[in-house]
Amino acid sequence: MQKETSYQFIHICIPAYKEENIIKTLNSLELCDVENLHVAISILVNEPENAGVDVTNVNQKCIKDIQSFQAMSSLNISFLHQVFPEKSAGVGLARKTLMDKASADYIDAGINGLIVALDADTIVLPNYLQEVSSYFAQYEHSAASIFYEHPLDCKEIIEYEYHLRYYNSMQFHAGFPFAYHTVGSAMVCTAKAYKDKGGMNKRKAGEDFYFMQKFIKDQVCGNITKTTLIPSSRESDRVPFGTGRAVLKYTDDTYSATTYNPLSFDLLAKLNILVSDSYDKPQNRWTEDRLLAQFLQSIDFNKNMDICIKNTKDKSSFLKRYYQFFDAFKLMKCLHFMRENYPDISIEAAARFYQEKYSSKSYESVERALIQLRIEERIRFESM
């Protein structure tokens, strides 16, 4: 008999708020290959204490759907219904509640199993669970981002996903080592790492970004590319930003989607080259660009560079420490700061720029450009 490993234990955590069709997600999990795996699914139907009747009614239907599914399914499914205080209610608290419980259960059992974050409107492929387990059995990572692809059924979601992949790929080409996707429905970590990193946060939005950065900054995060998640492309007002909110913006006829200016990334790429060389060749001037120079001054760049150099023994450790200082948070702040001189550009313009400079093929439509970028990104992740 094959000896069981911790990575054969998978606990899936699904927050559900105002979720009208959770059965699609559960049906896709039912079709997964679970041979030699121990899979538990926890669902938290939640709402704020000031929720209106419309939210309460949808949540009550969701509970009935889960109960009906439980009665017919072979899956190990449990669910809770919880009303949160208005001040703290949100997806972060819901994820934290579920993932804290999963972590505690693993610790009590002495198992360093896997904690998976999934959303109640996301479809998984039949190989999903096996590929998640196999990845952690093969690689010594503490966390991973799972490859995703939205259904390309509308302009809104095509442009939104292109923005996400363009932003990620431009980080990579600029030399940043933290070019990972941080999508809430596509995260997994070990129970031990979850506890060691302080668990999930309570943010109402962006909780996924802040959570995954804990692993990305320490270079213990990987990418699972041999399966694909399919998040919903519907519009939603449930969170301040993200897929649903991005699609919702298109209901305003005056809205036009944009993304970061590539000239900002060009300046940052030059900065990263100078930083890399600075361990052996100290620099006095980091950029000729006025706005970037102002941003660097605002974060005490020179002082922190001195700290990085003085407290590392070789170039490799210096660069690791540098990118822990100039991390994904500072990158985003820098891009926003530089908008004064380098305003955002249209998605179409971003696609043309990216294809001309980096892509192996060129397409006129954003949809075809996105499909090509998916292919190239998957290849890149597999080589990391």
Image: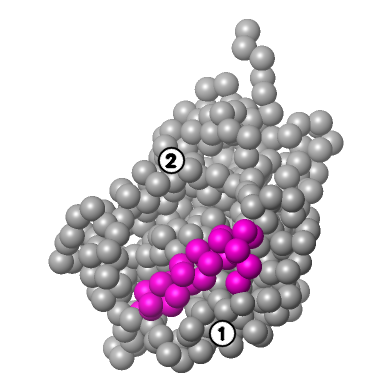
Q: Residue furthest top?
A: 1
Tag 1–tag 2 contact (CB < 8 Å): no
Left or right position of 208 against 200: left
Q: Residue at x 43, y 90 (%)?
A: 341
Mark 1: give few (<14), some (14-19) or many (20+) Cα within 10 Å.
Answer: some
Q: Secondary structure at mark 1?
A: helix
Front one among 55 and 166: 166
Instruction: Find disc 2 in the rendering and name its residue.
Output: 383
Judge whether residue 26 can be spotted in this image.
no
Judge whether residue 271 can be spotted in this image.
yes
Where are the magenta residues, as a range?
258-283
Residue type of the residue flagged with mark 1: Ala
Q: Residue furthest right?
A: 108
Give yes or no for residue 9 being in the magenta stretch. Answer: no
Which circle's residue, 1 or 2, is located before the other in the chain? 1
Left or right position of 294 against 263: right
Q: Residue at x 80, y 44 (%)?
A: 104
Provide residue 64's location: percent of width, then percent of height.
Answer: 56, 53
Residue type of the residue flagged with mark 2: Ser
How far apart in space, not on screen, are marks 1 and 2 (Cα)?
Answer: 34 Å
Q: Which-is-in-front pick, marks 1 and 2?
A: 1
Q: Residue at x 19, y 55 (%)?
A: 361
Instruction: Find disc 1 in the rendering and name its residue.
Output: 293
Front one among 78 and 280: 280
